[in-house]
Image: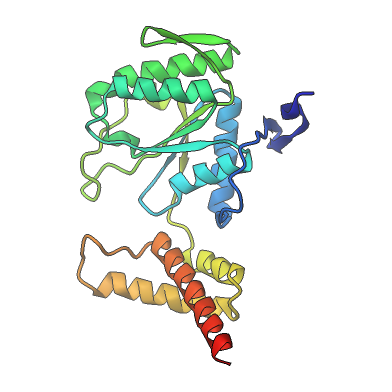
Amino acid sequence: MNIKKMHKQQCAKQDLIILMNIKGMDKSQCIHPLTDKCYLTLTQGMSMGYGGNPYGPAGTGKTESVKALGQLFGRQVLVFNCDEGIDFKSMGRIFMGLVKCGAWGCFDEFNRLLEEQLSAISQQIQIIQNAIKENSQSMTLMGQTCMVNKDSGIFVTLNPAGKNYGGRSKLPDNLKQLFRPVAMSIPDNELIAEVLLYSEGFKNAKILAEKIITIFTLSRQLLSPQQHYDWGIESTQNNIDSGWINYIRRKKIGSRNQ
């Protein structure tokens, strides 16, 4: 019996097979309206044989949304940080590995790659997507023939090109057409902090979330800008986790003293 045929997930009339890549009890992503839009766009792109392209400023959950969606479908998600030192040959080897094992590849800050490499990389991605659309058993990439696992997927995240994000290239049109874009705006940090506090068991989570976000907002506005300062939602989540761990630790110490 084929186990894959027993488990499917439907998203907007599109059936996606749930695989058996179990990661355990990882912390799940906080779901908000922006996450729903991202999930819907990415799944519809996959149903048509395309990749996904969440784009927007840093700290908006682009990479985390791809990882969370992959976890929902039992897929192995591998994240690669792109930079100017990666050429099309390196990308080709990564693509071949993803296609063989059926994993998802999320290429973070994809527009940091050099412009002269993007044209060759777009041809490689197009070969992979055509093989998946046509249900081909094998394909030829970089002069090598490899088996194709149709459960594989390619996703890229982009930061906007501007003075705040240096070294970003503009993607060519033929590369943009291979991905389904979804704009990721800055989420409601207070709502996310409230949900995280409730999930950790804090009482009066709404009041605490408002105070935490106010402190982070004032710190970002009043403190001098430093390279190691991070006042985004990731730092907020880390502080909430640290607060919960310290609370449990103090509670255990108090019970021992009694």
x and y, in percent, of residue 85 in the image: 22, 31
Asked which quadrant contains residue 235, the reply is bottom left
Residue 110 on image: x %, y %: 34, 35
Nearer to us in this view, 163 or 236: 236
Using the image, determine if residue 114 lies above or below residue 225. Answer: above
Task: State the residue at coordinates (55%, 71%).
Answer: 197
Which residue is depicted at the point 55% across and 83% down? 251
Q: Is residue 159 left or right of residue 240?
A: left
Question: Looking at the image, how many numbered discs can be counted on the residues?
Answer: 0
Which residue lies at the image location 59% right of the left edge and 32% below the top edge? 44
Horizontal side of 150 relative to 58 (left or right) equals right
Quadrant location of the C terminus in the rendered image? bottom right
- The type of colouring in the image is rainbow
Q: Nearer the viewer, residue 2 or 234?
A: 2
Tell me if 111 is positioned left or right of 95 in this view. left
Q: Which residue is drawn at 25% across and 62% down?
A: 228
